[in-house]
Image (cartoon, grey):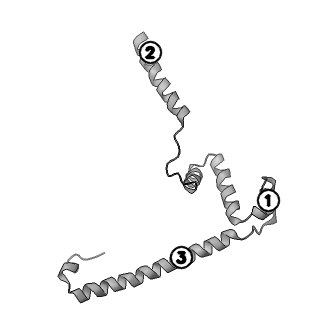
């Protein structure tokens, strides 16, 4: 935890001190970017490898996928879709984000049912 009494704002530091802090921050930022890039490349490499479990590959093939298309990434997507269709909301959210939609599309039928229920409540109040 920082002690606020020890903090010196950049406006009170010399230009050389501010420049040196900025340089150190830039070096650390570059190292973090390189680390993230190498992790992303490793993940992409692993996901592009074929599925090593023959039973899993056969199961995916029975879902009408060609053996050429079956890799770890496809297996992961199929697993997400299976979980989402079973009702897992987190898996459904991940799929929606993968498709580029931040917010799932609203169910128009549910909206219409809600409006109809509100209208019926209003009618019941008038009839009584």
User: Can you say which quadrant of the picture contains the N terminus?
Assistant: bottom left
Residue 30: image quadrant is: bottom left
Label 1 or label 2, whichever lies nearer to me, is: 1
Image coordinates of residue 11 in percent, x first then y, are 19, 79
**Circle 2 is placed at which residue position?**
124
Distance, label 3 to label 1, CA atoms, is: 31 Å
Res. 25 in view: yes
Res. 128 in view: no
Distance, label 3 to label 2, CA atoms, is: 62 Å
**Circle 1 is placed at which residue position?**
66
Please tell me which of labels 1 and 2 falls first in the chain: 1
Element at label 3: helix
Name the residue at the left extreme. Answer: 12
- Residue that appears at 52% across and 46% down: 104
Evaluate if marks 3 and 2 touch, with contact meaning CB atoms under 8 Å apart: no
Please tell me which of labels 3 and 2 falls first in the chain: 3
Image coordinates of residue 107 in percent, x first then y, are 54, 37
Please tell me which of labels 3 and 1 falls first in the chain: 3
Q: For mark 2, does the 10 Å Cα neighbourhood hold few (<14), some (14 to 19), or many (20 or more) residues?
A: few
Q: For mark 3, does the 10 Å Cα neighbourhood hold few (<14), some (14 to 19), or many (20 or more) residues?
A: few
- Residue that appears at 77% across and 61% down: 56
Distance, label 1 to label 2, CA atoms, is: 57 Å
| Left or right of residue 20: residue 96 | right
Label 3 or label 2, whichever lies nearer to me, is: 3
**Circle 3 is placed at which residue position?**
37
Evaluate if marks 1 and 2 touch, with contact meaning CB atoms under 8 Å apart: no
The answer to whether 84 is drawn above or below residue 55 in the figure is above
Element at label 2: helix
Image coordinates of residue 80 in percent, x first then y, are 64, 55
């Amino acid at each position: 935890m920082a002690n606020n009494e020890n903090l010196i704002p950049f406006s009170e530091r010399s230009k050389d001190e501010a420049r040196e802090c900025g340089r150190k921050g830039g070096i650390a930022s570059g190292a973090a970017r390189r680390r993230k890039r190498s992790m992303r490349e490793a993940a992409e490499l692993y996901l592009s490898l074929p599925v090593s479990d023959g039973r899993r590959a056969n199961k995916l093939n029975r879902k009408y996928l060609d053996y050429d298309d079956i890799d770890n990434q496809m297996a992961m997507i199929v697993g997400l879709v299976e979980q989402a269709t079973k009702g897992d909301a987190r898996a459904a959210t991940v799929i929606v984000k993968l498709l580029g939609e931040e917010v799932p599309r609203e169910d128009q039928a549910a909206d219409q049912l809600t409006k109809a229920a509100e209208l019926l409540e209003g009618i019941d109040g008038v009839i009584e």
